[in-house]
Amino acid sequence: MRLDLRDIIHVPDARKDFQFQLDLSGLDFYGSKPIAHPVLAQGSVTNHAGALVLEGTSSSTLDLTCDRCGKAFSREKTVKLDSLVAQELEDEENDDILLLEGTELDLDEAVTTAFVLAMDTKNLCSDDCKGLCAKCGADLNLGPCGCRPEVDPRLAALAQLLDKESE
């Protein structure tokens, strides 16, 4: 979506609202496509004493796979949009400012960039997910597996003594 800001560029305290849906289902993250649902973006661009400020949120439900146990789960993701907008840059090193194309702002690009940069690198179904057993692959969230704990080879002689005492 392209938002024409011609009406507010030179008008202090002027504001232009927006709300739209964006399809990011084609984006690939390490072999999966977690943004299967449309991203809802809403907010406004306001002229604060000559400085254009983009404020708002973008949100969607992500379809993820837990990195510890492998279960599929869904999670709501909301990203805050907060950027300055300018017609031209004074220096090339400021990446935080969104650049207008004439009098129009490309909201699709702004929302896509903000949403992708806010994606988590590790996804867990819950903060206390125990994962899978390294030996048998059992889901440790459902209970302990039947594997015996591995004994450090340096302590194997002591383990044998303990086994004899328990008989």
Image (cartoon, rainbow, N blue to C red):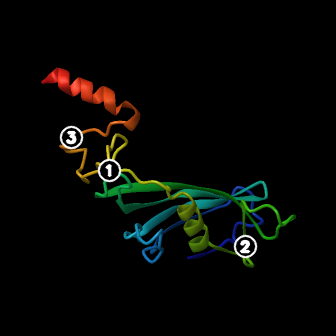
Residue drawn where x is 21% and y is 40% of the image: 144
Above or below — where is 167 with respect to 24?
A: above
Q: Looking at the rendered structure, which numbered label has been put on residue 134? A: 1
Q: Residue furthest right?
A: 90
| In the foreground, 140 or 25 | 140
Residue 62 is situated, as x and y percent measured from the top left of the image, at 38, 62
Q: Residues within 10 Å of mark 1 (few under 14, many from 20)?
A: few
Query: SS at mark 3?
Result: loop
Residue denoted by label 3 = 144
Q: Residues within 10 Å of mark 3 (few under 14, many from 20)?
A: few
| In the foreground, 93 or 68 | 68
Q: Which numbered disc, 1 or 3, marks the residue that appears first in the sequence?
A: 1
Residue drawn where x is 55% and y is 76% of the image: 1
Q: Between tags 2 and 3, which lies in front? A: 3
Judge left or right: residue 98 versus residue 50.
Answer: left
Q: Looking at the rendered structure, which numbered label has been put on residue 100? A: 2
Query: SS at mark 2?
Result: loop
Task: Give the distance between the C-alpha atoms of the residues marked 1 and 3, in whole angstroms.
Answer: 12 Å
Query: SS at mark 1?
Result: loop
The C terminus: image quadrant: top left
Q: Amino acid at mark 1?
A: Ala
Q: Residue furthest left?
A: 167
Query: Which image quadrant for residue 40?
Result: bottom left
Q: Between tags 1 and 3, which lies in front? A: 1
